[in-house]
Image (cartoon, coloured by chain):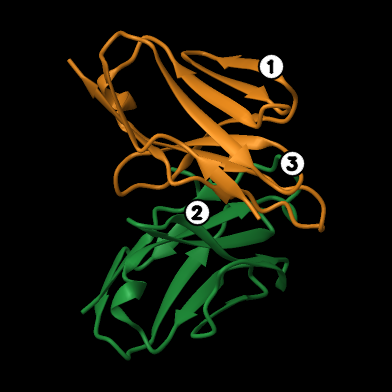
Amino acid sequence: GQNIDQPTEMTATEGAIVQINCTYQTSGFNGLFWYQQHAGEAPTFLSYNVLDGLEEKGRFSSFLSRSKGYSYLLLKELQMKDSASYLCAVTPGGGGSYIPTFGRGTSLIVHP
Amino acid sequence: DSGVTQTPKHLITATGQRVTLRCSPRSGDLSVYWYQQSLDQGLQFLIQYYNGEERAKGNILERFSAQQFPDLHSELNLSSLELGDSALYFCASSPQEGLAGDEQFFGPGTRLTVL
């Protein structure tokens, strides 16, 4: 089975940096996604990591350590519009299906 | 705007009723996925169709069924509705059958309220 853990809620200040952690235990591994979801809206893709290391994309970076079953999403220069839920999703290995399993999400509140 | 459309946006119905949710994938995408999102469960995968055929099945109840039509739009049918079925239902699409690393493009969702 799959088990994905993320903090339920985090708060941060506009302009600051925040790191959202995700730990997982899965049967096999074929990559990890981060999605952003504003309240009542559709999730939108942020990043995909399949190899260890840091992937940087503008203000957002995502890190993966497969041996530790650990990932984080780093958001820099926080803006009010970054207030949203951040979903970690892990793609299992084998079996011919690569449907990602989503964590419950971390609700990030950015305040002035 | 992801290019995925879903109708209706909101649906309010009573217990025991049956409803149909509709999804049109992005132009050219062959796979459609259905998800249920409730406050206590997060985003739960229900079922995937690829080019008209069922490709993968998740935690979909027997009261729920889906299909994908030749024009690639999909419908999710929910019957004998219960209060606990109240949730946001998302449809997503991807170009191929869902390979590792394939990004899914989500529609705006249908909010179902069962009274």
| Disc ID at residue B4 | 2
Label 3: how many residues lie within 10 Å, few (<14), some (14-19) or many (20+)?
some
Q: At x 73% / y 30%, what residue is drawn?
A: A50
Q: In this rendering, would B55 be left or right of A81?
A: right
Label 2: how many residues lie within 10 Å, few (<14), some (14-19) or many (20+)?
many
Chain depicted in orange:
A
Disc 3 element: loop
Q: Are marks 2 and 3 on the same chain?
A: no
The amino acid sitting under disc 3 is Phe
Looking at the image, is B92 positioned above or below residue B114? Answer: above
Q: CA distance from mark 2 to mark 3?
A: 28 Å
Chain depicted in green:
B
Chain under numbered label 3: A
Chain under numbered label 1: A
Q: At x 46% / y 36%, what residue is drawn?
A: A6
Question: Mark 2, mark 1: which one is toward the viewer?
Answer: 1
